[in-house]
Image (cartoon, helix red, strand yellow):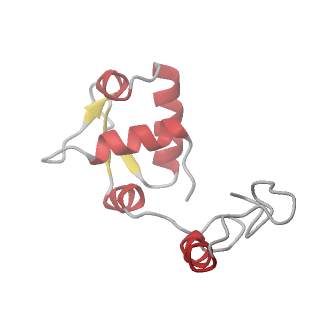
């Protein structure tokens, strides 16, 4: 799953709590150095996808779900175009070609997305 920068920062801040405990939006703003609106938007999307959950009472406190902790700690190597960047990196290191085809453009070889 691809995260926006605010989503990654918020989910990272929530998943870094040892022992796991809930944080308020104000605490998340301080931890991530993001404006309150960005934190709210990130929390909204994270809660819709089941990666974070909030309390229903008092000052809203947010915590990372188990699924959210896995999503932020497990690296994703497959892009939306469906190829594996680890395999491409291995192929580049084996052939010595860093990309660039004939004209030296970045992204011409081995894939157009990186």
Q: Position of residue 40 (x, y in %)?
A: 48, 29
State the residue in front, 2 or 78.
78
Can the viewer see residue 36 in this picture? yes
Can the viewer see residue 54 in this picture? no
State the residue in front, 34 or 36.
34
Seen at 54% across and 33% down, the residue is 41
Indicate left or right for 8 with 26 as reference.
Answer: right
Q: Is residue 6 above or below residue 76?
A: above
Q: Position of residue 92 (x, y in %)?
A: 62, 73
Q: Quadrant of residue 111?
A: bottom right
Seen at 39% across and 64% down, the residue is 74
Q: Is residue 76 above or below residue 40?
A: below
Q: Position of residue 21 (x, y in %)?
A: 19, 42
Q: Quadrant of the N terminus?
A: bottom right
- The extreme left residue here reads 19
Q: Position of residue 5 (x, y in %)?
A: 52, 38
Q: How many marks?
A: 0
State the residue in front, 51 or 54.
51
Q: Is residue 68 above or below residue 12?
A: below
Q: Quadrant of the C terminus?
A: bottom right
Seen at 42% across and 38% down, the residue is 9
Indicate left or right for 50 with 57 as reference.
Answer: right
Seen at 61% across and 78% down, the residue is 91
Indicate left or right for 75 with 59 as reference.
Answer: right
């Amino acid at each position: 799953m691809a995260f926006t920068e605010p989503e990654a920062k918020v989910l990272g801040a929530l998943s870094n709590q040892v022992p796991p405990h809930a944080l308020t939006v104000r605490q998340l703003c301080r931890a991530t150095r993001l404006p309150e609106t960005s934190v709210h938007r990130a929390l909204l999307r994270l809660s819709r996808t089941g990666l974070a959950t909030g309390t229903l009472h008092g000052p809203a406190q947010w915590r990372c779900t188990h699924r959210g902790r896995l999503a932020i700690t497990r690296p994703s190597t497959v892009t939306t175009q469906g190829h594996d960047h680890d395999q491409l990196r291995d192929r580049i290191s084996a052939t010595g070609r860093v990309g660039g085809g004939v004209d030296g453009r970045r992204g011409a070889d081995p894939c157009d997305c990186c």
